[in-house]
Image (cartoon, rainbow, N blue to C red):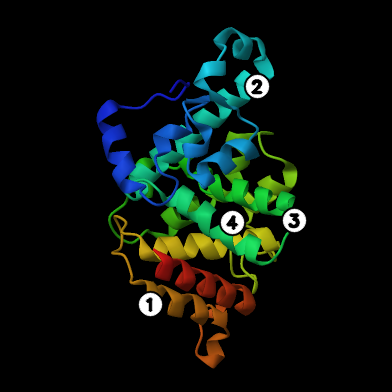
Amino acid sequence: MLGYYKIDKDLIKNIGIKCQNIEENIYHLCCPLIVENKKSLPSNLRYLYELLEIPIIPYSKFNKDRIEENKELENKIKKFTYYLELNIDIEMEEEKSLGHLLRVGKYAKELAESLQLSKKEVDDIYTAALFHDIGKYVIPKEIIGKNGKLTDEEFELIKTHCITARDILGDFLEENVMQMVESHHERLDGSGYKNGITPSLGAQIIGIADSYDAMISKRVYHNAENIDSAFEELLLCTRKKEDGGKGMLYDKKLVQKFIQIQKKMNKMA
């Protein structure tokens, strides 16, 4: 396998274990991907490469000189690999493990597909989910990986990651995808951040997927919740506080559909 991706050899060994049953192995997202047999790749991995128009090339047909002549493709490949590296750095600081961005992408894609959205809409939501936290890269590591409650000042700094994502990604993503990245922490009742606006459907889907994975994952600042508790928490976020909920953060039908999908997937696992 050839590509631009550079990573410590010892870390490679652990990545496969951390990411089992998600997208196989993050290291295999190096680009372009040269494989013996395209059909042997996990479907989600093939989907990601096809979505980003990055070639999966049979080794028998590999022509390095031909690829290097296509500078536009080469630049796109290098950019994607660079952004992936930033995401990995963020995850290692915040969770001390890898897989969050891929799980959120997977959950968001499953929910979007269940709503019978167009392929383009599903692709856009999936892409935004993959890069939803990239703005955290400019936040000091001692805040991202803080073992304890954030101060008000630190939390205000965390909030900026939605907006600073644009500074990092530039025009790499289409505008509607970039807007989903920027608004994935916005909530239906206006209590989200950074602008207190009503999020688009795509941003709502990513917000639900992101919140769910944050709850069931062990991080430096909290232990993982069990899945049923996470489902209950999501449902509480679809009811007003005066009705015993935590506010109208998420659309109830979306949350119910998400829970239905995850229960089905968990039974199949």
Amino acid marked by disc 4: Lys
How many C-alpha atoms fall within 10 Å of the one at disc 4: few (<14), some, or many (≥20)? many
For residue 8, which quarter of the picture?
top left
Quarter-wise, where is residue 193 in the image? bottom right
Q: Which residue is mark 4?
A: 109
Which element is circle 4 on? helix
Say which of marks 2 and 1 sits in front: 2
Ranked by sequence position, the earlier of labels 4 and 3 is: 4
> Disc 1 or disc 3, which is closer to the eye?
3
- Comparing 251 with 243, the one in front is 251
Residue receiving disc 3: 118
Say which label, 2 or 4, has the lower sequence index: 2
- Near mark 1 (Cα within 10 A), the count class, few <14, some 14-19 or many ≥20, is few
Separation of marks 2 and 1 at Cα, in angstroms: 45 Å
Q: Is residue 218 left or right of residue 266?
A: left
Identity, as a three-letter code, of the amino acid under mark 3: Ser
In space, the residues marked 1 and 4 are separated at their CA atoms by 22 Å
Q: Secondary structure at mark 3?
A: loop
Residue count near mark 2 (Cα–Cα under 10 Å), binned few <14, some 14–19, many ≥20:
some
Answer few, some or many: residues within 10 Å of disc 3's Cα (few below 14, many 20 plus, some between 14 and 19).
Answer: few
Return the residue at label 2. 73
- Who comes first in sequence, dot 2 or dot 1? 2
Q: Quick check: 252 above or below 99?
A: below
Residue 145 sits above or below residue 55 on the image: below
Name the residue carrying label 1.
Answer: 229
| Among the two numbered marks 1 and 3 on one chain, the one whose residue lies closer to the N terminus | 3
Please tell me whether mark 2 sits on a helix, a strand or a loop: helix
> Which secondary structure lies at badge 1?
helix
